[in-house]
Image (cartoon, rainbow, N blue to C red):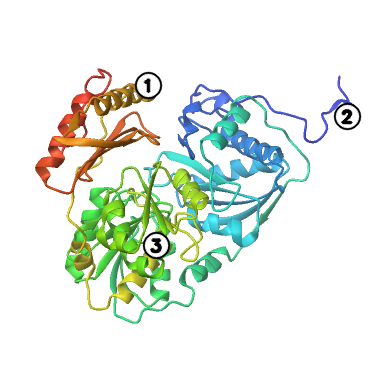
Amino acid sequence: MPGPDDAAPPGEAGLPPPLAAPVRENSWEFFAEPFIAPTGFREYDARWRFPEEINLPGMTALGLGLGTQMHERGLEPVIAVGNDYRAYSLAVKQALILGLVQAGISVRDIGTALSPMAYFAQMHLGTAAVAMVTASHNPNGWTGVKMGFEPPLTHGPEDMARLRDIVLGGEGRTAAGGSYVPVPGVREAYLADLAGSFRMSRRLRVVCATGNGTAGRFAPDLLERIGVEVIERHTGLDWTFPNYNPNPEALEMLEDMGREVRRHSADLAFGFDGDGDRCGVVDNEGHEIFADKMGVILARDLAPRHPGATVVADVKSTGLFAVDPVLRAHDIRADYWKTGHSHMKRRVKEIGALAGFEKSGHYFLAPPLGRGYDDGLRVAVEICRLMDRNPGRSLAELARALPRTWTTPTLSPYCPDTEKRAVLGRIIDRLRERAALGGRLGGRAITGIVTINGARVTLDNGAWGLVRASSNTPNLVVVCESFESREEMLAILADLDAVIRTEPLVGDYDQLP
C-alpha cells in the first residue's frame, strides 16, 4: 500500500475529470461523482440547469478549476465570492468555495449580493479575482458563475475556453494554503460608494421594481439615500418569484412597472434583474424606454461635459448613437461592438470610452461616472442625476426629443446550437456578395457591413439590419431599424429574411412586428 511519502506534493495532486453526461438525481453517483454539461461554459459566463446539468460535486470541480486557473495566471490566491438570493444558491456557492479552497485559494465570502456588488468587492477588498454565483435573469432551475481576474473585466471567450479545458480535462490541481473568511460590511460600503455625496434637488417619485429578487435588498435603500421618493413594487425577497421572473427586458415586468407609474402618478420606474446588473426604465407616461434609447438620452445629457468622448453600443442597439445631431454637435463618437456584458466591458476599457450601452439593459459607466462594470443601480443613480439636471422636463419629453426611429423587436428564429455559427457564416457570405453586386435592402443601397458580431448591414440613409448568432440559446438574432418609416423597417426585414431563408435549418420567428 502507498505510504505518506507516496502522496502527491501540494500543487500537483489532481482529481478525476467530472463526467460530461448527467446522472440521475436520486442515485449514488449523483452524490459521489461530479458531472458538468460542457454546454454550460458560454462565451462570457457559465450557466447550467441545476441539478440536471451540474451537481454540487461538479460545482466543486469548477471551483478547483477556477483556482487552478488563478495559479496558472500567476495571481495572488485570494478571491471574493458572493451569491444571489435563490433557494439553492448558498449550497452552490459553498460547493464552489470547497473547490477553491482545495486549490489553495483564500476565499473572502461577501454573502448574499448583487453581481455588481461582487465586482465592487474585488476592488474594495483588493482581491485578485471574483466569482459570483447567480442565474442572473434566468428562471429558477438555473445556476451559474460570473467570474473575473482583472477588474472591471469578467471572463471572455478565451478565459472561459481555458477554464472549460482545465475542468473537463481533469487539469485541476490541489494546493496547500486555502482558507475561508466571511467578510461583513461590503453591502454598506457598496451602497455608500453608489450614493456618494449626491442628493436630489428636485422632487422625484420613482417606482422601484425588483421582481422579488436580490435587488430588493439594495435598490430601495439606495434611492431613498439620494433623496428619491420610492414606491416599492415586489421588493420583498421571495425566491419562488411569485409575480414574475425579475427580468426588465421582459414585457411582463415592464408592463407591470408602467401600470404602477400611472397608478401612482410617478415620474418614472426602475426595474432590476435577478442579480442587479441590468436596469429597465419606464417613463412618466408608463412607456418603456429600452436601454439603447435610454443610452442616447444619457449620452445627450453627458455630451456637453465630455465633448469628443466615445461611447460603445452593442450591435443590436439603435443607430442614433452614430447619427443623432446633438451627439454629433459635441463630437461624440460611436463604436458598435459585440453583444455580451464581458465583450462590452472589455471594449469600454480598451478604447477608453466614457460609457457603454447594451440593448438588453446592461450599462457600463467608466470613470469618472462609474467603475466600468455593468451595474443596474449605478445607472439608476445616473438617470436620477439626469432628471435633477433637467428640473423642468419629464422623462417622456426627453425621450420624445430624440429623432424618431422604427425598430423591430429582437427576433429569435430557431437555429440548432451546433449549426448556428456555420449557418451565420454562409448568410454573411451572401450578404457580402449582395453588397458587392450593388444589391439593396428595403430599396436602400448597402454602404457597409460590420462583422464583429454577426453582420450589421448599414444602408445609405443610416437604416440597418442585423443578423447574428445568439451566445446562449439555439437561435439567430435579427433586428432592423429605419429612420424613415415602419414600412421601410418592414421592407428591410423582408429582404434580410429572404437571405436568411436560404438556410433550411433556420426556423420561424418567435414574434413579428
How far from the left and from the top, in percent, is residue 234? 32, 60
**Foreground: disc 2 or disc 3:** 3
Q: Callout 1: helix, strand or loop?
A: helix
Q: Nearer the viewer, residue 84 or 291?
A: 291
Q: Is residue 455 left or right of residue 41?
A: left
Q: Of marks 1 and 2, which one's residue comes earlier in the chain?
A: 2
- Amino acid identity at mark 3: Val
Q: Residues within 10 Å of mark 3 (few under 14, many from 20)?
A: many
Q: Position of residue 8 (x, y in %)?
A: 82, 29
Three-letter amino acid code of the residue under disc 1: Ala
How many labels sit on residues? 3
On the image, numbered disc 3 is attached to which residue? Answer: 379
Which callout, 1 or 2, points to the residue nearer the camera? 1
SS at mark 3 in the image = helix
Residue 284 visible in the current orientation: no
State which quarter of the image contains the C terminus: top left
Residue 106 at x, y percent in the picture: 70, 49
Which residue is located at x 59 percent, y 34 percent? 163
Identify residue type, mark 2. Answer: Pro
Residue position marked by numbered label 2 in the rendering: 4
- Where does the N terminus fall, quadrant-wise? top right
Q: Residue at 59% across / 35% down in the picture? A: 62
Judge whether residue 487 can be spotted in this image: yes
- How far apart marks 1 and 3 lie (CA) works out to 37 Å
Label of residue 175 in the image = none
Q: Residue furthest bottom?
A: 201
Mark 2: which secondary structure? helix
Q: Mark 1 — residue?
A: 422
